[in-house]
């Protein structure tokens, strides 16, 4: 299994590419994470638009450089909006990321909508272990939006999901794993306080979309999103508590320079 | 009237209990306060889920350790969602907190929905003086989400509300009061800048829910939420302005140690 | 063209007036920007209420001191809510601000709703160059919520819009321009990192509304919102990255003293 970090030139290359493209990224996400997700994208040089105002799902889903869909966006739109955005991206060949937040936590109607999105073949999927196991048809045992499994336990399920639907699947945890069902990358590092900042996981889905915009190597693009996240989190470690950690994390994200020694 | 602060062992005991339980707390709240509310819960070790995606209100309302309902969540869901969450919590014996934000401010249809939630017997209610007086049937004279009365003026109304519907009622102000209609606690301290951070009051409702999860003594649990808030706010006082005060408040909340000397 | 900054007594007078009035400002805005917008208003001493809960659009639209409507609020309400708030403010003589975010970016149904709001004669309009050019019937060429034109290019269109619908039009950019079609003010300064903080532009719309509450001189009130913003941004410049810049910006906004030497 290949291990990747910010120190690897391939990772920095992906960030340099993002900064050159300045991709317009359209997201459907929940209102808890929306602000942080937009600020994460702005910090690295992407241009976010979020939400399902009128005909935005069809128009922006088709015209964006990349799309991310966080299933908890269903808290402020209907299933038809979310499906329309996914369909529009899929039909236009726009890369899109699915974050099936809280799938498998016990809400069957919600789960059905989330699983129904697989029809539109997400370019990549991200989540915690419980969510990805549930998405693959296993018993993930999630409790609300929290995981009760480790990222290691999710890897076989992850490879299954990725292979069966032809996507790149990524799981967050103490070590993050990224797989297309054949090859698997591991990205370590980060800081446990990322799990104490609401929306940090959801915002990683947004960053994955930005990295996938115009990407030649989708596995590396997804790995880069994780490695950039982990590096910014490590550089934010001097923060004294969870509030200033979130601020320092955004600062460090905005300061990451792909050309630095 | 008993006065309580962070220095009292009963208060610290409640926080220690919360940290051991790590309760899953489900909230319906407004999108202005949702991010801070989730971060407040994460800072003390609780696990939040927020919003009305599909069948979440029925499922999470029943399965959470505690629920909080901020009436301004009606800005992104319908009355039926909010009633379903309240009903689900009530029927399953899950403690739930009602925050009747802006009730009595002149919007009769909104007020009717808020008052209708009393049918599901909230475990606790919180608000500013205008809101709680209005909820008790008096003239609170609120202006939007701001109060025009003091917390002292609200105490008799508060005792009335608490006794008549069998709940714990809490009012925020320079001094906070918590009552079940027979006994009343006072919690002082805090920092006036808490009123200059949007959603700080709403997020206190979330913390009350987390404290009520598995609580033996509901009055003490609600008092603990207020005393923990006041202590974190006081420790955040060196902050230079309202932006860094909010950050420092979260930091201090995440650092509060119930075992410290 | 008159240039204005924080150093001008007319500008400080407007902020002093706002602080004395403590206006209740009602906003319909998107959930990405809602939190920052409320915190901007609280930082200067205004009292915000946000969102379309039940009958709030009609009641608060009529009873607030000022109203701001950010068209992207359509991501969590319907066109009828947004029209009702605009109509209520207009009929009650309450000053209101229109922020036509992302108009002209390719979504015709959305654009039609935004343009339809002009029927209710906004007191002021704000946006980036692409948006204001599109609103005036030109080809703005916006990409999502980002502009592809400069504020200088927008000035003739701006003067057109302002004159034809009898409003004060303001465009943000390296230099901000404010015009009623006859007189034009320029406000320089600020910090480019304001464009890297999500919702900073939307929150300026909220501050414009607060300044317009009870204003004698609407051009000066709108100019004051821009000059106050620019001054707070300049004072926040020592911040190391985009995360702490946003925090420092709020701090400086809360510390701005209209009586200082």
Image: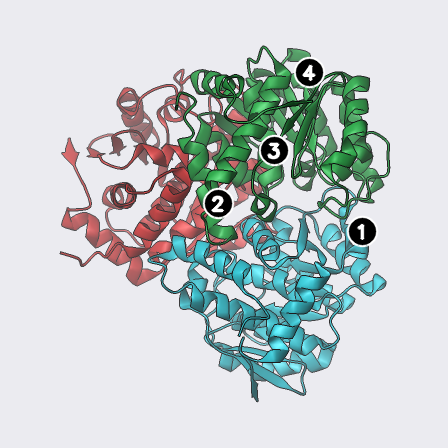
Chain colours: A green, B cyan, C red
Q: Quadrant of the N terminus of chain A?
A: top right
Question: CA separation, marks 2 and 1?
Answer: 39 Å
Task: Give the mark, 2 or 3, whose residue is nearer the N terminus.
Answer: 3
* B225 in relation to B68, above or below: below
Q: Residues within 10 Å of mark 4 (few under 14, many from 20)?
A: many
Which mark, residue A188?
A: 3
Label of residue A90 in the image: 4
- The numbered dot on residue A237 is 2
- Do pointers 1 and 4 mark residues of a single chain? no
- To the question of a shared chain for discs 2 and 1, the answer is no
Q: With respect to residue B131, does A83 lie above or below?
A: above
Using the image as rendered, state which of residue A76 and residue C250 is in the foreground: C250
Please determine whether, in this image, residue C52 is positioned above or below residue B221: above
**Which chain is disc 2 placed on?**
A
- The image shows residue A40 at horizontal and vertical percentages of 50, 34
Alpha-carbon distance for marks 1 and 3?
A: 38 Å
Secondary structure state at the residue bearing disc 4: helix
Q: Earlier in the sequence, mark 2 or mark 4?
A: 4
Q: Are marks 1 and 3 on the same chain?
A: no
Point out residue A33 in the picture as x, y percentages from the top left corner: 58, 41
Q: How many marks?
A: 4
Q: Which residue is mark 1?
A: B58
């Amino acid at each position: 299994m290949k291990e990747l970090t910010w120190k690897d030139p391939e990772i920095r290359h992906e960030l340099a590419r993002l900064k050159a493209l300045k991709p317009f990224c359209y997201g459907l996400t929940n209102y808890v994470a929306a602000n942080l997700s937009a600020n994460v994208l702005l910090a690295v040089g992407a241009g976010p638009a979020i939400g399902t105002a009128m005909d935005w799902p069809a128009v922006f889903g088709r015209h964006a450089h990349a799309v991310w869909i966080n299933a908890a966006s269903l808290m402020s739109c209907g299933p038809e909006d979310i499906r329309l955005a996914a369909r529009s991206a899929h039909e236009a060949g726009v890369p899109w990321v699915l974050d099936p937040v809280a799938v498998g936590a016990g809400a069957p109607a919600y789960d059905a909508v989330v699983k129904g999105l697989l029809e539109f073949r997400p370019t990549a999927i991200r989540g915690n272990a419980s969510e990805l196991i549930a998405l693959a048809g296993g018993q993930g045992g999630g409790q609300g939006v929290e995981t009760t499994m480790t990222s290691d336990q999710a890897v076989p399920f992850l490879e299954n999901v990725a292979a069966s639907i032809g996507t790149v699947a990524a799981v967050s945890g103490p070590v993050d794993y990224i797989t297309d069902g054949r090859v698997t990358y591991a990205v370590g590092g980060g800081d446990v306080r990322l799990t104490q900042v609401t929306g940090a996981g959801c915002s990683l889905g947004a960053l994955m979309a930005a990295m996938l915009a115009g990407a030649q190597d989708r596995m590396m693009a997804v790995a880069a999103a994780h490695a950039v996240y982990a590096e910014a989190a490590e550089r934010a470690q001097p923060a004294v508590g969870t509030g200033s950690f979130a601020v320092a994390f955004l600062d460090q994200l905005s300061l990451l320079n792909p050309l630095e020694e």
